[in-house]
Amino acid sequence: SFEHSAERRMVLSGHLLGSSHLRALLPSLTALTGRMHVPPGWTLDGLVIGAEGGHKVVSEQVDRLLGANVSLVGLWIQDWSGMVSTRNGEMVWWNWELDEVRYPRWWMREIVNKGIKLLTYINPMLAAAPSSDGRPPSVFLEAKRLDHLLKDTAGEPIVMWNPLNGIPYGQVDLLRNETWNWWVQL
């Protein structure tokens, strides 16, 4: 990493690791970056799949696997929060509230009752554009209202544009305790 500003001289810092084999570097690298925890034991009991497309599409995939006696232990749903139209097609809408049309709660209970664990994810980026079906970006608007977005030097929320799809988004300032507490309750 490096830092440079008009007021300060450039500061350069880092680590140099060397080996004749990539695998031999892993202990040294992970001593710096951290080591992954062992996955939960249930992940060894069967298949964890990633699926998307709404509850009807995903149910067909799940039923096909269960009908073939596949031990399905987990279902990762990427598009649980909805979709947004972009110039490159549709992508996951970073609003981080359940799209209950796409994935109704009753459907999720049915999946869990089959013994399948449901997995989702979030990241600290919040879409500033409406969803494909016209819903406003409520989490972005709340974060902006509560002052939880990263700010520029003038103190204004930073709204960036994803260069791949043209969607505007803000990023949650997770280094502030008040913001962190809001985020983990989301």
Image (spheres, rainbow, N blue to C red):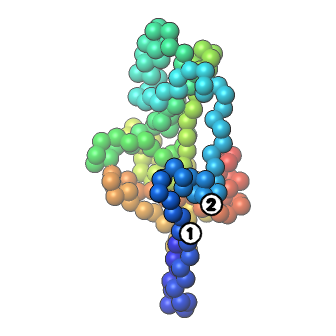
Q: Residue at x 32, y 47 (%)?
A: 86
For residue 51, side relative to residue 151 (left or right)? left
Type of the residue with mark 1: His
- The answer to whether residue 15 shows anywhere in this view is yes
Type of the residue with mark 2: Leu
Q: Residue at x 65, y 38 (%)?
A: 38
**Label ID, residue 32:** 2
Q: Which residue is mark 1?
A: 15
Q: Residue at x 33, y 51 (%)?
A: 165
Q: CA distance from mark 1 to mark 2?
A: 9 Å
Quadrant of residue 116 within the rendered picture: top right
Asked if 102 appears above or below 88 in the picture, the reply is above
Q: Position of residue 74 (x, y in %)?
A: 56, 25
Quadrant of residue 32 within the rendered picture: bottom right
Query: For the residue carrying disc 1, how many other residues have a C-alpha within 10 Å: few (<14), some (14-19), or many (20+)?
Result: few
Asked if 39 appears above or below 5 in the picture, the reply is above
For residue 142, side relative to residue 129 (left or right)? right
Quarter containing the C terminus: top right
Q: Secondary structure at mark 2?
A: helix
Q: Which one is earlier in the sequence, the residue at label 1 or at label 2?
A: 1
| Residues at circles 1 and 2 in contact by the CB criterion of under 8 Å | yes
Q: Residue at x 67, y 48 (%)?
A: 184
Q: Secondary structure at mark 1?
A: loop
The front one of 132 and 166 is: 166
Q: Position of residue 71 (x, y in %)?
A: 54, 15
